[in-house]
Amino acid sequence: MPYIVVEMVLGIVALITLGFVLWTWIRRRRIADGGVVVVSGLATVDQPRWRLGLLRLGPRHLEWFSVAGPGLRPAHAWVRSAVDLGAPVPVSEEIPGLPGALEVKVLSETSDVEAKLALQPGASKAVRAWIESSPPGYNVNVA
């Protein structure tokens, strides 16, 4: 009898673990459907400690999602045409998952959240190029 209880508990734990892994994979795929995704860190005035997340470069918004979490909505979003990035500087502390990251201040006309992003050097250049390029459908008839 005690073996059956142990087997049931282990089975439930295994199912919960499998469900968590499956949801994490599905969530990551759903987030990536909307555009290019890079691993990044985020720090705000309210939460100055770096949090690891996914930065999505969508057609109209720059969106940051927490790495772990149940939701498919971004924790922070900035309008592409209203966002500007500060100069990249090396992060003073080591961020797990982002060795050698650069800190970039996010400046936005439409958001009152003061935020900093930690990005790998290549991702930092890609995000800057994405922001500086014209959004799809914006000034398409300019000669």
Image (tube, rainbow, N blue to C red):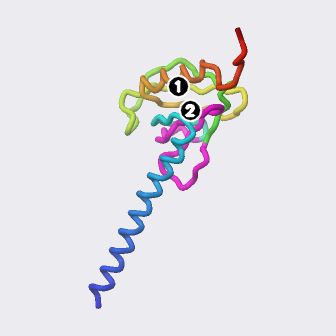
Which of the marked residues, 1 or 2, is nearer the chain's N terminus? 2
Residue 134 % position (x, y)? 64, 20
Give the camera-side residue of 121 and 142.
142
Q: Mark 2 — residue?
A: 57
Give the camera-side residue of 106 and 63.
63
Q: Say what secondary structure mark 1 lies in.
A: helix
Q: Is residue 4 above or below residue 34?
A: below
Most extreme residue toward the top is 143
Q: Is residue 57 left or right of residue 109?
A: left
What residue is at 42 percent from the left and 28 percent from the top? 120
Residue 127 % position (x, y)? 53, 25
Callout 2 crowding tier (Cα within 10 Å): few <14, some 14–19, many ≥20: many
Magenta-colored span = 47-75
Residue 50 lies in magenta, yes or no?
A: yes
Q: Is residue 94 left or right of residue 136?
A: left
Q: Is residue 21 above or below residue 31?
A: below
Callout 1 crowding tier (Cα within 10 Å): few <14, some 14–19, many ≥20: some
Give the camera-side residue of 51 and 14.
14
What residue is at 37 percent from the left and 70 percent from the top? 13
Q: Indicate the amino acid at tag 1.
A: Val
> Which of the labelled discs sits on residue 127, or is there none?
1
Q: Say what secondary structure mark 2 lies in.
A: strand
